[in-house]
């Protein structure tokens, strides 16, 4: 599968409070011809997801006011067919368990490389039907 050709038709959202990660990921996806919407907080994401659906949501675990797992729990009903990825620098058994309960499809440990995101998306897009 040519990952980026597949991603060009999908709506992708990244939520991370680190501006450097948001900007670098957005630039990376744009360089591959794909659009990546970026937001800083879970609250902004919940509001945006209420207005438009996304095919893929990538969220950081540690966010201001509400963590990424809680955000995924809150949007569960409206994002049943969405691929959900959690990125975290705090990988442990408790986080993994909570992510599984929240029906998150993959966890990526920080620091990560773009290749790690590519591998995750390739794996998930072959397993989970979207559009």
Image (cartoon, rainbow, N blue to C red):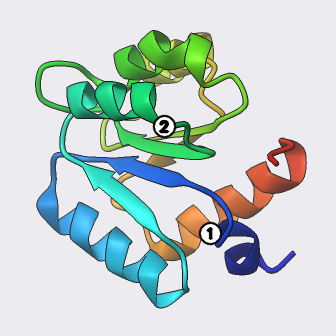
Q: Quadrant of residue 43?
A: top left
* In the rendered image, the vertical position of residue 74 relative to residue 14, given as above or below: above
Q: CA distance from mark 2 to mark 1?
A: 24 Å
> Residue 100, located in which quarter of the rendered image?
top right
Residue located farthest toward the front when viewing the structure as drawn:
51
The residue that appears at 20% across and 32% down in the rendered structure is 63
Q: Secondary structure at mark 1?
A: helix
Provide the secondary structure element on which disc 2 rests. loop
Q: Position of residue 52 (x, y in %)?
A: 48, 37
On the image, the x and y values in percent for residue 83 come to 65, 40
Tell me, for residue 52, which label it has, or none.
2
Placement of 27 over or under 59, stated as above or below: below
Q: Is residue 98 above or below residue 41?
A: above
Quadrant where the N terminus is found in the figure: bottom right
Of the pair 116 and 80, the residue shown nearer to us: 80
Q: Are marks 2 and 1 in contact (CB under 8 Å)?
A: no
In-image side of 8 versus 92 (left or right): right
> Which of label 2 and label 1 is nearer to you?
2
Characterize the local packing of mark 2: few (<14), some (14-19) or many (20 or more) Cα atoms within 10 angstroms.
few
- Let me know if residue 102 appears in the view: no
Rendering coords of residue 120 (x, y %):
66, 57
Whichever of callouts 2 and 1 sits on the residue coming sooner in the sequence is 2
Residue drawn at 52 percent across, 21 percent down:
99
User: In this image, 33 relative to 18: left or right?
Assistant: right
List the residue tagged with mark 1: 118
Picture coordinates of residue 20 (x, y %)? 16, 67
């Amino acid at each position: 599968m040519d990952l980026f050709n597949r991603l060009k038709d999908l709506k992708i959202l990244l939520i991370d409070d680190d501006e450097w990660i948001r900007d670098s990921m957005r630039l990376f996806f744009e360089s591959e011809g794909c659009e990546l919407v970026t937001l800083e907080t879970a609250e902004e994401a919940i509001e945006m997801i209420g207005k438009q659906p996304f095919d893929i949501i990538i969220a950081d675990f540690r966010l201001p006011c509400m963590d990424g797992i809680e955000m995924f729990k809150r949007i569960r009903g409206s994002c049943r067919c969405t691929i959900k990825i959690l990125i975290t620098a705090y990988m442990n058994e408790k986080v993994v368990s909570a992510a599984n309960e929240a029906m998150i499809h993959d966890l990526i440990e920080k620091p990560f490389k773009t290749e790690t995101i590519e591998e995750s998306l390739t794996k998930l897009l072959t397993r989970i039907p979207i559009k």
